[in-house]
Image (tube, rainbow, N blue to C red):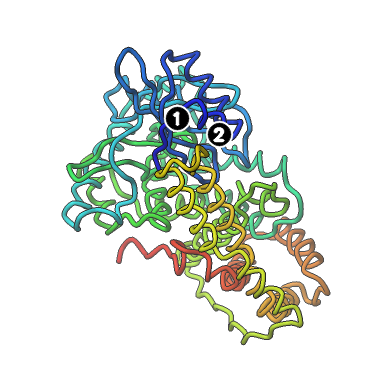
Amino acid sequence: MRIELSEAVRAKLPERWRRAFDWAERTLGGRVVAWEPQPRWRPACFFELERNGARLRLYWRGARSEWARDARPLEREMRVLEVLEKNGIRVPHVHGLSTDPPGLVLERLPGRFNLATAKDERHRRAVLDEYLIQLSKIHSIPIEEFEAIGFDRPRSAEQIGLGETRRYERAYRASKQRPEPMIEFQLAWCKRNVPRDRHELSFLACDAGQFMFDDAGLTGLIDFEMGYIGDYAADLAALRTRDLSEPIGDLGRAMNRYGEISGRDIDLRAIDYHTIRFALVNPLSLASVVAKPGRDANYVQYLGWFVVYGRCGLEVMARFTGVPLEPPRLPEAAPSRRAVAHAHLVDLLDPARAVGAIEDARSDARTGRSSVPDAAAEERAYDFDRMHRLAVYLENSDRHGAALEADDLDDVGRILGTRPTTWQEADLLLERLVLEAGPERDAELIRYFHRRLVREESLLHPVLREQQNASFPPLED
């Protein structure tokens, strides 16, 4: 909700936003007169700056709070946006970079994201075609322009194929909290199966498929913080992974349209490989956060990404290698003595309570009874929501977790030849096995890790939202 900022209202904003707006006024000139919070997993908001009799509509894009607390990744993205804008790509104009608090100030693009909100199928296809034209143009910009701002040119098949995964693996290993056998297996598989015939280099959005549009069409492309130089097939794979949470539409058609627009070959095996590899970036990025979450973590959101992207990548891997999967039997509920407490907590954290607080705050603001911005109520609603999702997950774990854990240990026992007594022992022994194994054990490990993630996903299912029942359909279908 948009909020006009009087001095009294501004004084009651969270401290990080007061500092952000002070920076904007010092650096850009003018006065911040309105804002619209965007409660999410990273600090972000829309705001309006009044300057020289006009209002600039801007967007504050903060640092990824759980992964990075400095401005360096944002500076990297700023340089990319400047190169793209210079080459005629439709991206938001950069107005500045703050280092304290870390934030990138961008032009606010009109419209909305997520093609699920398109007017109809014709509108969806038209917008996607516009996006594919822009993506093809990005892939045609000489990579020397990106080398000039600090990006490395890959020099081997491994560097081209693994792409940004190498950077995420380094960060994963530096922050690793515990054995992660599923991640180690998928990493080893990706390294053994790098495509050897992909030589054309392009600058890649990496997390492709992010753009804004309105009823008239595409308004601009967003989010380039993960960009790198590599194989254009990786961006087509990223469109596929984006489809898990924001439906793109007919992906087979999208791949063919990209080929028609760009004149490039569409290699479905290469796209499958990059789908597996790019899906793994989520577990790699989230492993330490899931193992040791910070106070502000949206834990269930992160765990959901970890599990769903891990499971979907394994399903593509199974098709890629011809391995038939064997999904597990899910047990009946067997709640413990603590079930009543879990149910009570779920009720206490019902987001409807926060919705009531928001409506009260809005009413007070409209009638002048309060000068406190209802943004605080919006943030409380976000907090209630993330805690409620966690409570539902724990309640479901109480009902099914013990049986699922026992089934998982049985599976591990069949792989190891002896049944571990705890999940911690199982993970330690599995990781040792994975690090020593070669491709001869791929089939049983693909099946096992898929079963394991399906079990965990069943506990998350009621609160997965847009990722419920997510999958990567075969592109040839």
In front here: 404 or 160?
Answer: 404
Q: Is residue 370 left or right of residue 112?
A: right
Between marks 2 and 1, how big is the CA–CA gap? 10 Å
Residue plotted at (71% across, 54% down): 291
Residue type at mark 2: give it.
Leu
Q: Is residue 193 left or right of residue 235?
A: right
Do callouts 2 and 1 mark residues in contact (Cβ within 8 Å)? yes
In front here: 217 or 371?
Answer: 371
Residue type at mark 1: give it.
Leu
Residue plotted at (45% across, 22% down): 79
x and y percentages locating residue 391 in the rendered image: 64, 66
Q: Which residue carries the number 1 mark?
A: 5
Residue 414 shows in the view = no
Q: Does dot 1 land on a helix, a strand or a loop?
A: loop
Name the quarter where the C terminus is drawn: bottom left
Name the quarter where the N terminus is drawn: top left
Q: Which residue carries the number 2 mark?
A: 13
**Residue 436, picture quadrant:** bottom right
Q: Is residue 410 left or right of residue 443?
A: right
Residue plotted at (27% across, 24% down): 88
**Residue 327, picture quadrant:** bottom right
In front here: 294 or 421?
Answer: 294
